[in-house]
Image: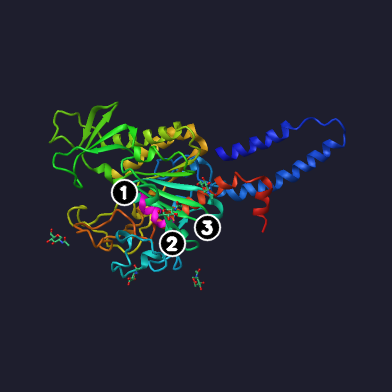
C-alpha cells in the first residue's frame, strides 16, 4: 500500500510541478507527453508491485489476508507451499567447492536427495528462480553482509554457491583479519561484489559468564543496549545488511542494561538473587538495539533486512538427547503450526520490526523465512553434517543442508533486492529494461 501511494504521489507532483504554460499549444503537448510517460510507468509499476509483500508482517501474525484487502495488488511472497520441482537445484557439492563440511549433506552420506526437489510457491504468485547473472548485474560494486550466528553464515554459504555458478569468488578474509572465527569476507572480482559474514550470535555485546567455562548450555551475559562491536564497528560501508539471531538465546542468560544487571533467564538455580526475566525480552532488546544502531549510524546508507527466526526440527528427543530430523519430504501448510518458543521468538522480533520500520521506511525490510522453513524438517543436515575434526555428539536439526531449502532464502533476497536496485535506475533505463 505504502509503495503504491508513494508512486502515485510522485506522479501527482509531476503534474503539479509543471509550470502553467502560457501558449495554448504547449498545454496539450505537455499533457500528451505526460500521458506517454505515465502509461509505461504504470505498466512498469504493475509488473513490479504484485510481488511486493505487504509492509506488515502477515505470516501467523493474527491478521488474515482479508484484513489487508490487498489480494489483487499484492502477493505475500512468504505465504505459500512447497511444490515438487525436480530441477530445483542450482548447484551440487561437486560444482560448488565452497560448501563447508557441516552442511555438505551429500558428501557425508545423505543418499535420499528428495529434499532437493521442491520449490517454494507463494499462494498468489510465482517466486522467480534465482538468476546469478542478473544478481551480479544488479549488485555489481556492492557489498552484502550477514550479521548473526552460524545460521546467518549458512545463508551466506548458500549465496556464495548460487553466485559461484557464474563467477569465481576469492576468499579475502585474511586480508582483513587475522582470525577467521569472527569474520568472513569473499569478493567476486569480476563484479566487485563483496559478501561478508560477521559473527555476532546475540547481535548485542556478549560474554561468557559461567564459572564452568563455555559449553552449549553455559550461562552468558548480554549487554542488551550495546551492539556487538564485531559488526557495529565495520558495517557502515555495506549496501545490504541481513541481520538474524536465534538458537543462542535458548541458553541461560544474564541481562545487563546501562552496565547494570537487570535480570536473567533460566538462571534461577545458580543465581536465585537475580530477577527471572523472559529470554524473549532479551531477544526483543537485541533487535531493538540492532535496529537503533543501524538507524543512527552516521554514513550508513545500506538497506537492512531482518531475516526472521529459523526453526529447528528435533523429533524423537531433545537436541541433546538423541533428537533427530530424518524426514524426507516437506510438510504441508496444514501440518505446521508456529507455536511455543518458535512463535515467541518470531513475535518478539516481529514486534520490534513493526516498531522500527516506520522510522526507516525503505531502509528496513523483511525476509520472513520462518514459515517456509517451518515446513522443511527434511532440510537439515541431521546426521549428515559431521565435521571430520569434530566429535559430533548430537544431530544437527538447526542448520540447513547446502544445497537445500536455504537456497530459497536467497531467492527471496534476490527478489526483494530487485525493486530496490531498479528504483535507482533512470526512467529510461527502466523502460529499456522492461522492453523485451
Ligand atoms: C529439467 O532440466 C532438464 C535438463 O536440464 C530439462 O530437459 C527439463 O525440461 C527440465 N524440466 C523442467 C520441469 O524444467
Ligand atoms: C559429493 O557428494 C558425493 C555423494 O553424493 C560424494 O561421493 C563426493 O565425495 C562429494 N564431493 C565433494 C567434493 O564434496
Ligand atoms: C569496488 O566496490 C567498492 C564498494 O564495495 C568500492 O569502494 C571500490 O571502489 C570498488 N572498486 C572498483 C575497482 O571498482
Ligand atoms: C589479499 O592478500 C593476498 C595475500 O596477501 C594478496 O596477494 C592479494 O592481492 C590481496 N587481495 C586484495 C584484493 O587485497
Ligand atoms: C568421540 O567421543 C567419544 C566419546 O566421548 C570418544 O570415545 C572418542 O574417542 C571420540 N572421538 C574422537 C575422534 O575424538
Q: Mark 1: few, some, or many residues within 10 Å (few <14, many ≥20)?
A: few
315 versus 148 height, above or below: below
Q: How far apart are marks 2 and 3 (CA)?
A: 35 Å
Residue 15, percent across and down? 72, 34
The 10 Å Cα crowd at callout 3, few under 14, some 14 to 19, many 20 or more, is few
Q: Where is residue 68 in the image (x, y as percent from the top left)?
A: 50, 40
Q: On the picture, is 155 further left or further right than 300? A: left
Please give left or right for residue 340 compared with residue 59 in the image: left
Q: What element carries label 1?
A: loop
Q: Earlier in the sequence, mark 3 or mark 1?
A: 1
The residue identified by callout 1 is: 179
Residue 346's quadrant in the figure? Answer: top left
The answer to whether residue 10 is seen in the rendering is: yes
Answer with the quarter of the image where residue 97 lies: bottom left
Question: Mark 1 or 2, which is nearer the eye?
Answer: 1
Instruction: Tell which of 123 and 132 is nearer to you.
Output: 132
> What residue is drawn where x is 39% and y is 37%?
233
Q: Which colour scheme is used?
A: rainbow
**Of the pair 285 and 164, the residue shown nearer to us:** 164
Which secondary structure, mark 3?
loop
**Residue at numbered disc 3:** 190
- The span shown in magenta is 152-159
Q: Residue at x 85, y 30 (%)?
A: 22
Q: Residue at x 13, y 35 (%)?
A: 270
Q: Nearer the viewer, residue 389 or 254?
A: 389
SS at mark 2?
strand
Q: Name the residue under label 2.
A: 83
The alpha-carbon separation of the residues under discs 1 and 2 comes to 42 Å
Disc nearest the viewer among 2 and 3? 3
Residue 122 visible in the shown view:
no
Amino acid at each position: 500500500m505504502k509503495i503504491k501511494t508513494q508512486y502515485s504521489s510522485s506522479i501527482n507532483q509531476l503534474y503539479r510541478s509543471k509550470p502553467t504554460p502560457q501558449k495554448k499549444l504547449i498545454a496539450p503537448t505537455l499533457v500528451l507527453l505526460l500521458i506517454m510517460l505515465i502509461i509505461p510507468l504504470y505498466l512498469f509499476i504493475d509488473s513490479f508491485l504484485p510481488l511486493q509483500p505487504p509492509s506488515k508482517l502477515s505470516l501467523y501474525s493474527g491478521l488474515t489476508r482479508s484484513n489487508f484487502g490487498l489480494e489483487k495488488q499484492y502477493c505475500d511472497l512468504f505465504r505459500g507451499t512447497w511444490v515438487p520441482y525436480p530441477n530445483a537445484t542450482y548447484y551440487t557439492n561437486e560444482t560448488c567447492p565452497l560448501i563447508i563440511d557441516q552442511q555438505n549433506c551429500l558428501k557425508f552420506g545423505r543418499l535420499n536427495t528428495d529434499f532437493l526437489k521442491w520449490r517454494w510457491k507463494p499462494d498468489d504468485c510465482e517466486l522467480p528462480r534465482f538468476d546469478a547473472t542478473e544478481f551480479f548485474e544488479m549488485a555489481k560494486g556492492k557489498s552484502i553482509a550477514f550479521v548473526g550466528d552460524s545460521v546467518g553464515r549458512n545463508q551466506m554459504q548458500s549465496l556464495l554457491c548460487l553466485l559461484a555458478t557464474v563467477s569465481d569468488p576469492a576468499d579475502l578474509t585474511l586480508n582483513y583479519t587475522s582470525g577467521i572465527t569472527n569474520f568472513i569476507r569473499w569478493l567476486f572480482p569480476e563484479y566487485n561484489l563483496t559478501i561478508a559474514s560477521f559473527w555476532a550470535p546475540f547481535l548485542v555485546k556478549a560474554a561468557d559468564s559461567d564459572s564452568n567455562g563455555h559449553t552449549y548450555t553455559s550461562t552468558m551475559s548480554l549487554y542488551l543496549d550495546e551492539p556487538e562491536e564485531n559488526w557495529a564497528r565495520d558495517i557502515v560501508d555495506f549496501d545490504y545488511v541481513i541481520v538474524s539471531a536465534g538458537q543462542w538465546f535458548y541458553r541461560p542468560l544474564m541481562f545487563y542494561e546501562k552496565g547494570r544487571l537487570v535480570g536473567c533467564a533460566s538462571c534461577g538455580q545458580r543465581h536465585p538473587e537475580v530477577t527471572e526475566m523472559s529470554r524473549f525480552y532479551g531477544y526483543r532488546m537485541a533487535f531493538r538495539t540492532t535496529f537503533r544502531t543501524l538507524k543512527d549510524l552516521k554514513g550508513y546508507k545500506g538497506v537492512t533486512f531482518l531475516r526472521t527466526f529459523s526453526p529447528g526440527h528435533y523429533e524423537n528427543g531433545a537436541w541433546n538427547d538423541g533428537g533427530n530430523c530424518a524426514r524426507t519430504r516437506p510438510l504441508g501448510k496444514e501440518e505446521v503450526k508456529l507455536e511455543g518458543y518458535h512463535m515467541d521468538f518470531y513475535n518478539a522480533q516481529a514486534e520490534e520490526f513493526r516498531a522500527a520500520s516506520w522510522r526507516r521506511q525503505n531502509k528496513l525490510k523483511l525476509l520472513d523465512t520462518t514459515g517456509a522453513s517451518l515446513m522443511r524438517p527434511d532440510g537439515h543436515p541431521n546426521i549428515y553434517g559431521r565435521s571430520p575434526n569434530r566429535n559430533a555428539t548430537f544431530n544437527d536439526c538447526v542448520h540447513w543442508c547446502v544445497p537445500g531449502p536455504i537456497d530459497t532464502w536467497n531467492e527471496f533476497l534476490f527478489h526483494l533486492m530487485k525493486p530496490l536496485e531498479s528504483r535507482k535506475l533512470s526512467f529510461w533505463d527502466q523502460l529499456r529494461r522492461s522492453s523485451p
